[in-house]
Structures are given as structure tokens and as C-alpha cells.
Image (tube, helix red, strand yellow):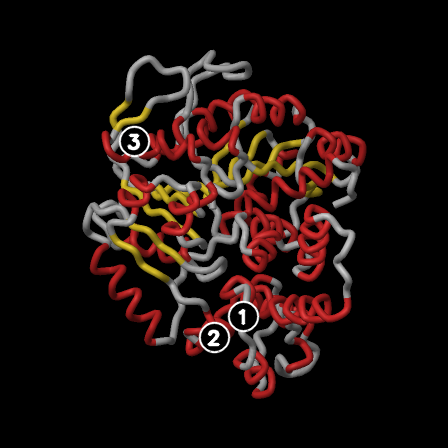
Amino acid sequence: MELLIVGTLEGQIGAASKIAVQQGGQVTLADTVERGLEILRNGKSVELVMIDVKLDVYKFISSLEQERMNVLVVACGVANDSSLAVKAIKAGAKEYIPLPPDAELIGAVLAAATRENHALIYGDKKTEAILKMAKQIAPSEANILLTGESGTGKEIFSRFIHDNSKRANKKFVAVNCAAIPETLLESELFGYEKGAFTGAVARRIGKFEEASDGTLLLDEISEMDIKIQAKLLRAIQEKEIDRIGGKSPIKVNTRIIATSNRHLDEEVKKGTFRQDLYYRLNVVNIDIPPLRERMDDVMVLAKHFAKKYSELNDIPLKPISKKAEEKLLNYRWPGNVRELENTVHRAVLLSTGEEIDENAVILDDVSAVIQQQTEETNRSVDFSGNTLANMERTLIIDTLKHTMGNRTVAANILGISIRTLRNKLKQYQDEGLDI
């Protein structure tokens, strides 16, 4: 991941940078708030900013918001800077890291900031066949659509395609269309000119330009607003983009890889996705099956994650017991590889014996719980007198409870988009419901 450090960090820059690099990060340094903003405006792909609490954190975060730059910010400072830490959190920093930096804490923050893991680990014939196909089409210039449930590893497959393409030595830039609000996504993709809107104090290079000659991943493209889809279609067809507030088009040479956990042909029928854009993206479609359909991947991945998180947490690597293995193989993995990774990480931390036993493997089959709840509800609850809106709200909130707040899994179970779920939750909050 790309990390930007803003400030001197009380002389701890060297230590913080070294830890970040050890965790797989790439570090850029800026000594002032203005220099940090300038780096971001020039199209530098940054996923996490660590800023010194002694700087004007409020000004930095306010500028990001005004200039429509979407990046995670954490504050850092000496441990006794409690008042500055509180001030930074109130200013919008997502976390506070005391200095000198602790390797485990920085590792946890980096892991939370990005779920990246570029290693392709597999043992199943189905996965092998998909990789063979991906490698075959990678050198072409065709746009590619990767489909599959959330957590199946679509971003990792997209990086594999880029790494095996003729653009491998150029940039790979990823944009999560589901995570960025509609109001920010257009400027994130296409950039803007100085004065294009209130807060646009300088020109900003968008992801399309940044990825020119390289690859642009549009993750969960089905969540993109249909108005932005029109602008995206033009960029693909004409190979040029218009910055917001720009007076002339800018030529780009960007290969698109798009992913979706929904069936885009169904979204076309519903009118939420443009048919012409669908055809432009769907030159080659690679469908990644869920983990439950490639079970020979499970233990290969589980052992990989056990090694990874044992090393990350400085814990001796333990073998996975036979009973724990049976438990992993008898589970249907509604959250796919992402859920398996979290399960093994937790098991590594909870295991107390000489091996990782079945008691450390804690599973929560969300789909089974929801099915059971639905059956019980159908048998025992009288819906007469309830409005449709109230029933919908109850179902959404109950599903979120059972998914422990995981909105992606909840949206999949409910059969709605993440954007729809987000809008519903905002509506409930506006109505005074504590979400």
C-alpha cells in the first residue's frame, strides 16, 4: 500500500517508515500540510496518511473534504499529547498512534486501511483454470470484467492480470466505487481544475490520468451512479477525459478492469446500469466461483494465512489440527476468502495449545442464521398492521445484527446493493434511529 507521512513525527519518521515498509507499504514523506496536499493533488496514489498531531490536522482534513480527496487519515504524536490526540480525532482523523511507533499497532492500522494481499495462493483445479485463462488474455488490450461474490479475491485476480500484461511496469490504480460517495467519485476518477467548485484551490489529477499507460481497476462498478457511467463510457470510447471545470479534453491510454459482485445484465434490465457501458466492459468476462465451490483452496489458504498472521503478531507458527481442518472444510464460507482470512487470523490469536485446534476456529454461518430467522419469523409473527416500510427496516436492521455490522455481507443476503443499504441506513438515522 502507499503511505504518506506528513510532518516530522517527533524525529520518529525513520522508525515509522521502516515499520511501514516491513509491513509491505511504500512511503512518501512531506514535511508540511501544504506539501502533503500538493502530493495528493498531483495524482499520487495514497491509501493512508499519517500526520503529526502538532500540525494543523483540521486544516489538512478540511482541505481533503473541500477538494474531494478520499483518503484515510491517522494522527501520530508522543504518548503524552492526549489533548492534541483528542483534537485530531475531532478534526476527523480515524485513529491515533502514539510515538515511538509500535510495530504491531502500525501493522494493525495498515491492515485495517487496506485488505491488500497480492499473493495468489490456490490448490483447486477451478482456480488453476481461471488463472490460466487470466494469463492468456492479460497481454491483450481488452477491457475485462471480473464477477463473483464479495470476498472471492477479484482485486487479487485483477492485479495478477496487470502483472502479466504489457503494462506490468506501469501503474496499477484501484478505485473502490462502493466505498466512495457519489459526490466524490467523479472528481476521484476524472480530477478537476482549480476553481471548478468551492474548495478546488488547485488542479487535481484524477485516477484515469494517473493510470494512463497502465491499468485502472474499477472495483464494484455496479455501485457507480448512472450519471458517472455516461462519462466513463465516453472515456473508454474516445480515450479521453474531461476534468471537472476543464476547457479541453485530455487524452488517456488506460486499460480498464472492472469487478462486480452483482449480475450486471440484471442491473441493465433494472435500468441501474447502462447497456452500452456493459458491452464496453464485458469484452472478456472471468467469473470467479465462491470458495464453497473450490474447496481444495481452503486448507492451502488457511495454512498461508496462519503463517502470515503468526509472523505479523510474532507468534510461533502452529499446525492446524485435524479436527480444526474438518471444521474449516465443512463450512460453506458465505464471506469467501475474506472470511477465511479473518477466521484464521482470529484462530492464530486465540490458540493456546501446541496446535490450532477446533475451539480456536470460531465460525458464524450468517446465511444459516438468517435462514433460520426467516423460517421462525414466517411461522410465529403476525405481520398484519405493519407497514411495508417498517417490515423492510426490521429486516435490514436484523440482518445487520446477524452479520455483526458487515454491510457487504448484509447487502448480499438482502439482495440489494451496498449503495441502497447505505441510503436506507442514512434514512433511518435521519428519522432518529440509532444505527
Disc 2 secondary structure class: helix
> Residue 5: percent from the left, percent from the top?
55, 35
Quadrant of residue 98 within the rendered picture: top right
Residue type indicated by callout 3: Ala
Kindly tell me whether residue 329 is visible in this rendering. yes
Residue located at (32% from left, 44% from top): 278
The residue that disc 1 covers is: 333
Please rate how many residues cluster around mark 1, counting C-alpha atoms within 10 Å: few if below 14, some from 14 to 19, many from 20: many
The residue that disc 3 covers is: 235
Tell me the quadrant of the picture where the C terminus can be found.
top right
Image side of residue 254 versus residue 79, left or right? left
Residue located at (33% from left, 56% from top): 160
> Residue 181: percent from the left, percent from the top?
54, 35
Tell me: residue 291, above or below residue 6. Answer: below
Extreme residue toward the bottom, this view: 322
The residue that disc 2 covers is: 298
The reply to whether callout 2 and callout 1 are in contact (CB within 8 Å) is yes
Residue type indicated by callout 2: Val
Image side of residue 159 versus residue 18, left or right? left
Q: Gap between marks 2 and 3, in whole Å? A: 40 Å
Q: Which of the two labelled residues, at mark 2 and mark 3, occupies the earlier sequence position? A: 3
